[in-house]
Amino acid sequence: MDRREMLRTLGAVGAVAAPAAVVAQQAAHVHGMADHQALIAASSNCVVKGEACMAHCQQMLAAGDKSMLPDCPRTGIEMVTLCGALRTLAAQDAPSLPKLAAVTMDACARCEAHCRKSAKTMAHCKECADACAACVTECRKIAKA
């Protein structure tokens, strides 16, 4: 094997080994994500469904439709904000996670109750309510810890 062939071989081995090392290093840094995967997924879904619901509310208001409940945007913003923070703390396995889970559980329960009132006529509200219910279930597991 000449010098060029050896360098090519070492380069190929390095190209394969480097990503594996990066993945292993990342896995070591995000062990909290594995511990709280269901909570991360539920809170992420709440953020997505809540933002879609709030966007729908804004479109309704822009069109002059004021049929939505008056506290809808406030309830949604609180839930989305807390779920985003919860997702971040769950990924970090932060010490304050149980306390934030309890607060978020309360906000999600209120948002769910609020959205259920319009769930039969508005798909966005139903999806948001369902996401909140799932997040309440996951929060309850952490809040008791």
Image (cartoon, rainbow, N blue to C red):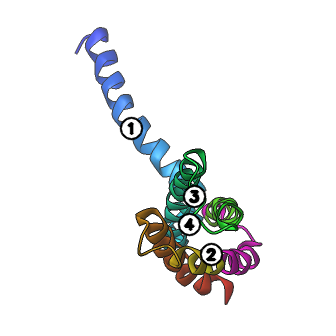
Q: Nearer the viewer, mark 3 or mark 4?
A: 4
Q: What residue is shown with label 2?
A: 108
Q: Secondary structure at mark 3?
A: loop
Pick the quarter of the image with the N terminus: top left
Dot 1 falls on a residue whose secondary structure is: helix
Q: Residue at x 40, y 44 (%)?
A: 20
Magenta part of the chain: 91-108
**Depicted 36 relative to depicted 59: above or below:** below
Is residue 120 a member of the stretch shown in magenta? no
Q: CA distance from mark 3 to mark 2?
A: 26 Å
Q: Give 64 or 128, whichever is nearer the viewer.
A: 64
- Which quadrant is home to the C terminus? bottom right
State yes or no: residue 106 in magenta: yes
Q: Earlier in the sequence, mark 3 or mark 4?
A: 3
Query: Callout 3: few (<14), some (14-19), or many (20+) C-alpha neighbours within 10 Å?
Result: some
Q: Which residue is mark 3?
A: 30
